[in-house]
Amino acid sequence: MQKSNLLKDFFRIYGNQENSPQLFFSPGRVNLIGEHTDYNGGFVLPCALSFGTYLVIRKTNDDNVKFASANFELKKSVSLKNLKEKVNGEWVNFPLGIIDQFSKKGKQISGLEFYYSGNIPNEAGLSSSASIELVTAFALNDLFGFDYSIIDLIMLSQKCEHEFIGVKCGIMDQFAVGMGKKDHALFLNCKTMKHIPVRFKLDGYRLIIANTNLKRGLSSSKYNERVSECARAVSDISKVMEINDLSDLSIDLFNEVKNEIKDNTVKQRATHVVYENNRVLKAVKALEQNQLETFGKLMIESHNSLRDKYEVTGFELDTLVEEALKIKGVIGSRMTGAGFGGCTVSIVKDEFVEEFQHKVGEEYFKKTKLKPDFYLPEIGDGVREV
Ligand code: GLA
């Protein structure tokens, strides 16, 4: 996306006033492995993508905050006095939620014009929401000199999800979008926030993201249900052993205490989390030792566990993975993100990339009557001014 075009659009909508606008960018993310572990204090391994959300923003001299987007019809002007009100089901709730978080910290803004333009597919599990949140938080921090660190802005964006949007998400998405590093995955401990960039440059292979294009419907309530199932597992185990999170348990310890978990479904959920956490450690080791095939096998194990134990995949995601694994040059494939629709991520030998898109596309359509989209992303940097 060209800076000059974004500015042209901005001036067309808002006119060319005295103050000059600034341009910011925030990526989407894909998670390689470590799914539904972040809100359990566990490990994750996401990367920031080369595509994301642009924000052109300018201070004004009036008392309104105006929102426009290249991707959605809705334009909105909200008076500075009414910023705390949520708008029914609309994208502007993400920037409104960020402004609300700043205001809770006693940080006030003045009149503003926002223009967003993004190329992350919506509701695809590639963190378009976290991307809007972070680009907004980063821009406001810069414009008003609030002086927060990126980590502060990441935490603030997560709180916006919890308190304004109503999704009890973990920290992974905001972290990847905020801290992403070109050609690297981020190995993050979600309890301590300690993170190590791990080189993820695939020689002879490509990362393919495949979008089920399934509309996810009630995904946020199902997500919150998983969060509370994990909390129930912790509470049952806490009767015999002091733990704060499921990630406090090694596989051996978990097997000693798992029968304390009374509900069988809850036990299955906890089993996924404990083993998935362990898989992330193995996956990082495999990457460091350049054992890509081992890495791919762990991706497949992760998907199977999300399908059978965590039950967040569904027919469409399972079909995409199944069809992907039938292609000779595919060494790993799994769902990525929250699940219930959204995308898969696969590692594919260069010479099979075309066959992948053709065959998986065809078979998926036959079975689901949906046309998938394929993306071949580069791994990019986190939020920044451009
Ligand atoms: C969503 C949430 C993340 C994480 C993933 C599942 O993307 O926003 O915090 O829990 O689902 O791994």
Image (tube, rainbow, N blue to C red):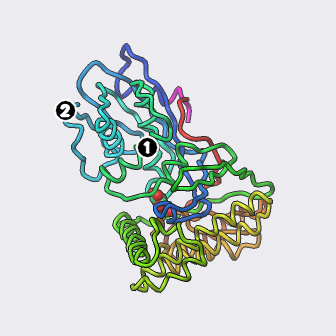
- Residue toward you, 23 or 264: 264
The residue at the far left in this view is 81
Query: Label 1 sits on what residue type?
Result: Ile
The residue at the far top in this view is 18
Q: Secondary structure at mark 2?
A: helix
Q: Is residue 29 visible?
A: yes
Kindly identify the residue that appears in the image at 76 percent across and 57 percent down. Answer: 288
Within the magenta stretch, is there residue 367?
Answer: no
Kindly identify the residue that appears in the image at 48 percent across and 75 percent down. Answer: 270
Q: Which residue is mark 2?
A: 81
- CB at disc 1 and ligand 1 closer than 8 Å: no
Lateral position of residue 152 relative to residue 377, left or right: left
N-term-proximal mark, 2 vs 1: 2
Q: Which secondary structure is most common in the magenta stretch? A: helix
Q: Is residue 3 above or below residue 178?
A: above
Which numbered disc covers residue 132?
1
Q: In the rendered view of the protein, which quadrant contains the C terminus? A: top right
Callout 2–callout 1 Cβ contact below 8 Å:
no
Q: CA distance from mark 2 to mark 1?
A: 22 Å
Q: In the rendered view of the protein, which quadrant contains the N terminus? A: top right
Query: Label 2 sits on what residue type?
Result: Lys
- Magenta segment range? 1-5
Q: Mark 2 or mark 1, which is nearer to you?
A: 2
Q: Position of residue 341 (x, y in %)?
A: 47, 67
Q: Position of residue 11 (x, y in %)?
A: 40, 24
Q: Is residue 69 above or below residue 214?
A: above
